[in-house]
Image (cartoon, rainbow, N blue to C red):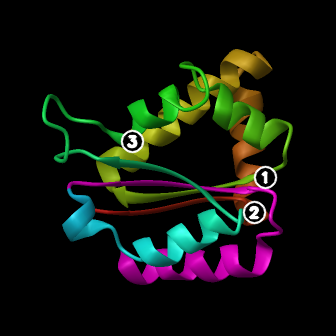
């Protein structure tokens, strides 16, 4: 897991152009214990090469914040941020975390894009194209 996410750092370092064109969706239990490469990611945020949508599920006082909810709520409440990022900004999306979370986040992205594009088939074709071009990556572990 951590090795895979470090390769995403290299991608961001080489592709980030200061336009927030990369999004890292990162989920883990605790920021203090599990936020791999957090300092590097925050530097990319500062230099506008990355936008991070984190969810530290065990750090809330009430309830748990999972990545799929954080993604849905980012930018308006129904996935508008991710749709705009992918369709209008030609942005990259990197998902890192547990396999159950990764599946839920991908489902969230599929739902948001399908609502805009009108069909799940069109959405899946788009995501496959993004995968082939290195703009959509899922690094998941159990």
Q: Is mark 1 in CB contact (under 8 Å) with mark 2?
A: yes
Which range is magenta? 1-29
Q: Between 44 and 132, which is closer to the camera in this rendering?
A: 44
Give residue 120's position: percent from left, percent from top.
Answer: 67, 25
Which label sits in the foreground, 2 or 3? Answer: 3
Can residue 133 be seen here? yes
Q: Is residue 117 above or below residue 3?
A: above
Mark 2 sits on what residue?
A: 132
In front of the other: 64 or 62: 62
Task: Label 3, secondary structure: give it.
Answer: helix
Label 3 packing within 10 angstroms: few (<14), some (14-19), many (20+): many
Secondary structure found at label 2: helix
Residue at 78 percent of width and 73 percent of height? 15
Residue 125 seen from this side: no
- The furthest residue to the front: 46
SS for tag 1? helix
Q: Which residue is mark 1?
A: 129
Which of the two discs, 1 and 3, labels the residue nearer the N terminus?
3
Q: CA distance from mark 1 to mark 3?
A: 24 Å
Q: Contact, CB < 8 Å: mark 1 with mark 3? A: no
- Whole-number angstrom distance, CA of label 2 to CA of label 3: 24 Å
Q: Nearer the viewer, mark 1 or mark 3?
A: 3
Measuring 66% from the left and 25% from the top, which residue is drawn there?
Answer: 80
Q: Is residue 130 left or right of residue 29?
A: right
Q: Which residue is mark 3?
A: 67
């Amino acid at each position: 897991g951590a090795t895979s996410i470090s390769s995403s750092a290299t991608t961001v370092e080489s592709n980030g152009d200061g336009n927030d064109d990369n999004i890292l969706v990162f989920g883990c239990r605790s920021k203090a214990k599990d936020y791999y490469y957090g300092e590097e990611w925050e530097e990319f945020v500062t230099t506008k090469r990355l936008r991070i949508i984190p969810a530290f599920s065990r750090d809330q006082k009430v309830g748990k914040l999972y990545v799929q909810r954080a993604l849905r709520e980012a930018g308006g409440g129904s996935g508008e941020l991710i749709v705009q990022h992918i369709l209008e900004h030609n942005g990259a999306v990197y998902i890192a975390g547990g396999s159950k979370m990764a599946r839920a986040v991908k489902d969230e992205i599929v739902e948001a894009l399908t609502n805009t594009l009108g069909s799940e088939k069109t959405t899946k074709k788009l995501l496959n194209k993004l995968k082939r071009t290195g703009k959509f990556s899922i690094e998941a572990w159990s």
